[in-house]
Amino acid sequence: MTGDELERVSGIRDVSSLYRNFDGEDVVIRPASGDRKAFRIEVMLEGDKAVFPATAPVEEGDLLERNDPRGGVIEYAIARYDFVKAPMSHFEDQWDATLVRKGRVARSFAQPQIVVHGGTNQFSIGDHNKMKQFNGAGSRELLEALDEAERSIPCDDLSSDQVEAVQDAIADVRSVASSDAKPSTMKRAIYGMSGVVDEVADSSKAGAKDGVKSWAAATTAAILSHVVGLSQY
C-alpha cells in the first residue's frame, strides 16, 4: 500500500461463511472522528442497508462512500449500527448498518484525502480529520437541521415525556451551535442528542412504530453528519 492508497480491512466475505458466495461491494468508510483513518472494505449493500463483519471499525455518524458508475461517488451517513448475534454457531456475528443518502459528490472513489474549500465552513476529511473552521454556513446548516428535527417529531406516537426529552436535547445542541464552543463540546452535544433520539426510538411505546423509526434514522443521520470535520480536541 502506498501513501496514495487507503488501507483495506477484512470485508464481509473474508470472514463470513454465510455471505462467502454472494457478490459484495467495495466501499470507503470515512470516520466522523479525527482519531480514526478512512479505509476500504467489502460489504453486502442493498438499498439503505449494509452488512459489515463483526470486526469492522465503524461507528454511527461515519460516512459510507460508494462508487457511482456515472462518475463521482454517492455518500451515505450511517444512522444506525446494530450488532447482530449469529443465530447458529457455524455462522459469524455481524453489524447491520442503516444508511441515509446524503447525495452525489464529484470526486474520485477512495480518494485518500478530501479537502473542501469555500465559504466559511472549511474542513478536511480523510485519513486525518482536522477542523479548520466551523461557523457561518456550517452553523446555519446545523441549526436548520435542528429546526427540521424539531418540526418533524412524531408527537402522536410518543409520550409527552419523550417529546420533552427530545426537545431538551435539541435545545442543548442549538445552544452550543449558537455559541463559540469548542469542537469537543459540539460533538458531546450532538452525540448526546443522538443518544436521546435512539433511546426514544427503541422504547416500548415507540419501538413498533415505523414512523418513529424513520424519523429517528433521518434525524440521527442529519445531525451526526455535522460531526464530520470536527477535530477531536
Image: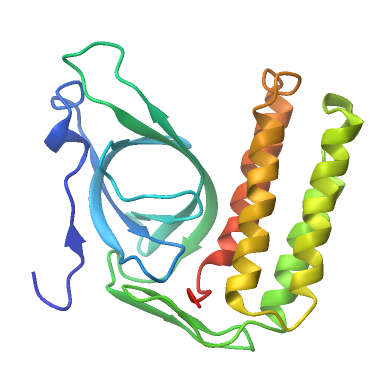
Frontmost residue, 104 versus 79: 79
Pinpoint residue 65: horizontal percent, then vertical percent.
38, 56
Q: In the rendered view, would you say 149 is above or below 185?
A: above
Frontmost residue, 55 versus 133: 55
Q: How is the image coloured?
A: rainbow
**Left or right of 11: which side holds 136?**
right
**Residue drawn where x is 48% and y is 37% of the image:** 48
Q: In the rendered view, would you say 219 is above or below 122?
A: above
| Name of the residue lying farthest toward the left | 1
**Residue 112 occupies which quadrant of the picture?**
bottom left
Q: In the rendered view, would you say 195 is above or below 92?
A: below
**Residue drawn where x is 18% and y is 63% of the image:** 7
**Residue drawn where x is 91% and y is 32% of the image:** 160
Please count the marks in the image.
Answer: 0
| Name of the residue lying farthest toward the top | 88
Pinpoint residue 189: horizontal percent, then vertical percent.
68, 61
**Residue drawn where x is 67% and y is 76% of the image:** 138
Pinpoint residue 58: horizontal percent, then vertical percent.
37, 50
Q: Where, quadrant-wise, is the N terminus in this rendering?
A: bottom left
**Residue 137 occupies which quadrant of the picture?**
bottom right
Pinpoint residue 127: horizontal percent, then vertical percent.
31, 73
Frontmost residue, 164 versus 148: 164
